[in-house]
Image: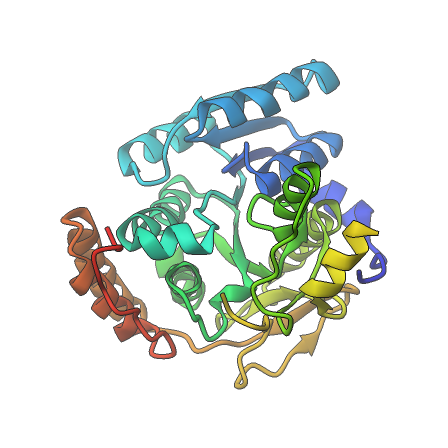
Amino acid sequence: ICPQARLDRDKVRQMIAGHRVLVTGAGGSIGSELVRQIAAYGPESLTLLDAGEYNLYAIDMEMAEKYPDLPRESILGDVRDRTRIDQVFAKQKPEIVFHAAAYNHVPLVEHNPNEGILTNTLGTRNVAEACRAAGVGTMVLISTDKAVNPANVMGASKRLAECYCQALETLPADQRGPTRFVTVRFGNVLGSTGSVVPLFRRQLEAGGPLTVTHEGITRYFMTIAEAVELVLQAAELGKHGVTDGGKIFVLDMGRPVKIIDLARQMIGEKLYEELFHDGEPPEPTETDGVMLAAPRVVDYALIKQVFDELGESAARRDTHKTLELMGRLVPEFQPPEIGVKSF
């Protein structure tokens, strides 16, 4: 596990204190930790948006207990539903948006590629365009290392989400509007819903064995709290234009850990993760643990056209067409063979 980075919490407090903040996917593992840390900085108001009723209820109850005086709204809504998202933004008037809503389970998204596109890719477009329309100051997209040279539909769907935000960030200011689009990419976090750790824990509680699919698999790990702190630092940096040209932030996840070693430690898919594409030499920032990468940028007019086509194919559940369109924008992605197992 990587050592805790030195953080400038005063700058984060200045960014959040007294401002209206909205978190999508607020009930998820990353989203709920964002809510906790943001609440501690004293925002003017905090809006929690999630499509999952129980997860939203749980984090709402936690906020009611810990921050009873913090003005907040907990809203059931799906990022796929542009009308609902626009309605929420018009009413809540957020100044900062953290977009954490996503499908993150690789096998499930591989099995349901159209759903992955509708939520991860087109849902991000809905949130980004709602930010533009509402004059939001900063939108932060929570992305994943699996978007680098994506070997699966989930990674490719998140790479497409990155591409859309990059394309908006590179528009001239008069076209982009006041919103800065900040993307933060990181690897596995310990205990997140998509992480191997909860799986190992369940297997241990059941008396074992622990399943390791390949002894060579490695993963980067940091705690959810550490990752979210760095996301907030990156958001603060992004306010100042360091992402000009479509650069994205990448969290330094420390050393990769062998899953088999993690399994052994607790007792007593892509074989390795990458944080950077070969063509993305990392640049340091003024914040420890936060680096900048400059992935390929897709022209906004092109991405808008392909996303419209993706919206149609995914809504029809035309998996062949959806995967073909994904490959058009993400040439590194090799679509899987489509059989009876894809929906």
Residue toward you, 338 or 113: 338
Q: Tell me where residue 28 sits by quadrant.
A: top right
55 up-or-down from 193: above or below:
above
Residue 142 placed where, x, y %? Answer: 54, 52
Residue 233 placed where, x, y %? Answer: 71, 54
Please state, as top left, top right, bottom left or bottom right, where the N terminus lies in the image. bottom right
Residue toward you, 128 or 343: 343
Residue 196 placed where, x, y %? Answer: 62, 52
Residue toward you, 161 or 72: 161
19 up-or-down from 227: above or below:
above
Q: Is residue 121 visible?
A: no
The structure residue drawn at horizontal position 35% and vertical position 60%, both measured from the top left corner, is: 175
Q: Is residue 228 visible?
A: yes
Left or right of residue 2: residue 16? left
Left or right of residue 284: residue 171? left
The structure residue drawn at horizontal position 47% and vertical position 50%, both measured from the top left corner, is: 105
Residue toward you, 291 or 8: 291
Q: Tell me where residue 36 sits by quadrant.
A: top right
